[in-house]
Amino acid sequence: MSLEAVAPTLFTIGSGGLIGFLAGFALKRIFKILAVIVGIFFATLMYFQSQNLISVNWDKIQSMSQGMVSTLAHSLTDTGQISTIAGNLGIPLTGGLAAGFAIGVMKG
């Protein structure tokens, strides 16, 4: 087997891995920043409520957040879209993307 025959597949795997790594790294950084912002927001709400400056309906906030979390969990566990993407992109590119994304999330 010559290098010319394997080179396109290796390029597809490598470029998919690089794109996946960058996407995973950026996504983890963005989620970290969002978590800090949301934490500061809720800490500020708690402080203002403890100082009797505002009144917060925590039951309403809890019900809203549970709805958003369940929607997010449902969209992340929908495997029908993943199989469609893998079929359209091809196994080498999808495998490279998945491996790169996993490494990017771990390193981010």
Image (cartoon, grey):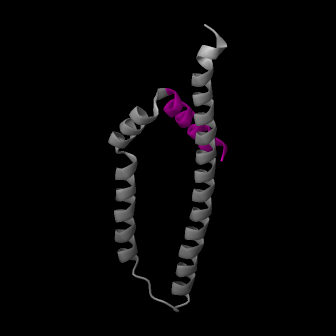
Q: Residue furthest top?
A: 1
Q: Quadrant of residue 103?
A: top right
Tell me which residue sits at (59%, 69%) in the image. 37
Tell me which residue sits at (67%, 43%) in the image. 107
**With respect to residue 33, does 3 lie above or below?**
above
**With respect to residue 90, does 85 lie above or below?**
below
Q: Position of residue 101 (x, y in %)?
A: 57, 40
**With respect to residue 79, does 60 lie above or below?**
below
Q: Position of residue 50 (x, y in %)?
A: 53, 85
Q: Position of residue 3 (x, y in %)?
A: 66, 14
**With respect to residue 66, does 8 lie above or below?**
above
The residue range painted magenta reads: 92-108
Magenta stretch prevailing secondary structure: helix
Q: Relative to residue 63, is residue 97 drawn left or right?
A: right
Q: Is residue 73 magenta?
A: no
Q: How many marks?
A: 0
Q: Quadrant of residue 102?
A: top right
Q: Residue furthest bottom?
A: 53
Is residue 5 or residue 39 the one in the foreground? 5
Q: Is residue 104 magenta?
A: yes
Tell me which residue sits at (52%, 36%) in the image. 98
Q: Relative to residue 6, is residue 83 drawn left or right?
A: left
Q: Relative to residue 84, is residue 22 drawn left or right?
A: right
Q: Residue furthest front?
A: 4
Q: Position of residue 36 (x, y in %)?
A: 61, 65
Split into 4 quadrants, where in the image is the N terminus? top right
